[in-house]
Amino acid sequence: MYNGVTWGAVVFLPSLDQQFYRDEHLFVHLRHQVVMLDSEAVSLHPIEYRLLALLVKHAGEVVPRAIILKQIWGDAPDIPRHRADPHIHGLRKRLGVYGDQYIETVIGIGYRFRPLHDLQHQGPPEADALN
């Protein structure tokens, strides 16, 4: 696991106290499994949430398809190579107009969460209410 990612002015800080990603549009709190888009709660299917959390934890880095399959579906030998694709599609759809901005397909390799790097980092909304 990575200790933290700084991507321009947007910061994701995985630690025991703060596990969140935030920019102007998207907020993801990993410990509380909260996802908000433009200040509205986003309802994700469990697999979509796990995919988003995995990608956010590795923000800015390509997460290979094999790692995604292992982390989300385990070691089952019969998992189709493209099993994640419809779930990624659903996740992009739930992220609305920002879906393709945040989640990049790296053809032949996997996916990358692309933080919006021209925005300043802020703490989570209503941080006290989440702790």
Image (cartoon, rainbow, N blue to C red):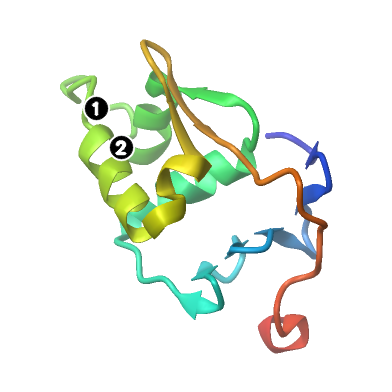
Q: Secondary structure at mark 2?
A: helix
Give x and y (percent) for residue 110: 42, 22
**Residue highlighted by disc 2:** 73
107 with respect to 37 (left or right): left
User: 108 or 54, which lies in front?
Assistant: 108
Give x and y (percent) for residue 5: 77, 39
Which of the two marks, 2 or 1, is nearer to us in this view? 2
Q: Given the image, on which type of amino acid does mark 2 rest?
A: Trp
Q: Are marks 2 and 1 in contact (CB under 8 Å)?
A: yes
- In this rendering, does residue 49 appear at all? no
Task: Look at 27% across and 43% down and name the residue there.
Answer: 89
Task: Look at 59% across and 63% down and name the residue there.
Answer: 25
111 with respect to 80 (left or right): right
98 with respect to 91 (left or right): right
* Vertical comparison of 35 with 14: above or below: below
Task: Look at 39% across and 20% down and name the residue there.
Answer: 66
